[in-house]
Image (cartoon, coloured by chain):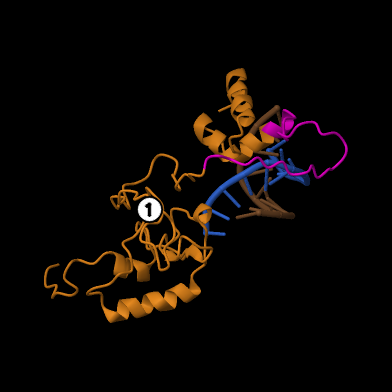
Chain colours: A orange, B blue, C brown
DNA sequence: CCCTGATTCGC
DNA sequence: GCGAATCAGG
């Protein structure tokens, strides 16, 4: 494909809207993000920042207190395979002041059943304990399709993060967490089937 | 690892 | 002019 006036216009618009090169490339189709970036440069609209002129200044940070306090849960774009579809537990709006771990995490997403165990193999639990030591401690924004989304710690404190290790293809968690997350009901059972 | 934009340079 | 390859950063 080539850069028809039409496509160039779309490019300008989208770039102006702050879309990323790869996003634009995807939407335009027929081009790669490199092509888009290259074009952007040739068009001379590389930096979206204002013409602050020749000086690099560190403008004082203007922080306005936001009355809003509801952080959007990590809402992934749109097309999500129906991979992890834990029916989000109704977001209970409990006041935050729990001494121990709080069950609710964030609304929405495939957040796991609490580590509250019952009949989970001791082995799996042990593994989880191990894994949590190696966890990458990712924060919400850093989670992706392939990072384990198992929460660790107390959401009400800073002592909270997500496992972040590589997930088992398709699953929302890493192998260890998957083991405790999806219990068949009966811990073990002879599987002659298959 | 995933992603971002920036640059280079052969075509 | 174009964009793959590469670079630099998060």
Residue A91: image location, x then y, percent: 34, 49
Magenta segment boundaries in residue numbering: A40-68
Judge left or right: residue A6 versus residue A115: right
Residue at the right extreme of this rendering: A54
Residue A124: image location, x then y, percent: 31, 76
Q: Is residue A45 magenta?
A: yes
Frontmost residue, A94 versus A113: A94
Residue visible at 48% across and 44% down in the picture: A70
Judge left or right: residue A45 versus residue A80: right
Residue visible at 62% across and 31% down in the picture: A15
Question: Which quadrant holds residue A119?
Answer: bottom left
Query: What residue does disc 1 label?
Result: A94
Frontmost residue, A8 versus A54: A54
Q: Is residue A172 above or below residue A37?
A: below
How busy is the neighbourhood of tag 1: few (under 14 within 10 Å), some, or many (20 plus)? few
Question: Which quadrant holds residue A65?
Answer: top right
Query: Label 1: chain?
Result: A
Q: Is residue A125 visible?
A: yes
Q: Is residue A185 above or below residue A21?
A: below
Frontmost residue, A138 versus C5: A138
Quadrant in which the N terminus of chain A is drawn: top right
Q: Is residue A170 above or below residue A121?
A: above
Q: Is residue A57 above or below residue A36?
A: below
Q: Is residue A67 magenta?
A: yes
Frontmost residue, A42 versus A142: A142
Question: Which quadrant holds residue A25?
Answer: top right
Residue visible at 54% across and 63% down in the picture: A158
């Amino acid at each position: 494909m080539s850069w028809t006036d039409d496509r160039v216009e779309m490019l300008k618009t989208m770039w102006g809207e702050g879309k990323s090169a790869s996003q634009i490339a995807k939407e335009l189709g027929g081009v790669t993000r490199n092509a888009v970036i290259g074009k952007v440069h040739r068009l001379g609209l590389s930096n979206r920042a204002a013409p602050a002129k020749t000086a690099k200044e560190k403008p004082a940070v203007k922080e306005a207190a936001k009355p809003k306090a509801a952080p959007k849960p990590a809402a992934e774009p749109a097309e999500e395979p129906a991979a992890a579809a834990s029916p989000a537990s109704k977001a209970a709006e409990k006041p935050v002041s729990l001494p121990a771990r709080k069950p609710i995490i964030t609304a929405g997403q495939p957040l796991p059943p609490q580590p509250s165990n019952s009949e989970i193999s001791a082995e799996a639990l042990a593994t989880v304990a191990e894994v949590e030591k190696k966890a990458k401690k990712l924060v919400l924004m850093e989670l992706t399709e392939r990072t384990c989304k198992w929460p660790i710690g107390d959401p009400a404190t800073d002592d909270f993060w997500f496992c972040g290790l590589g997930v088992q293809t398709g699953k929302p968690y890493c192998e260890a967490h998957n083991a405790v997350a999806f219990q068949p009901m009966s811990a073990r059972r002879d599987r002659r089937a298959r």
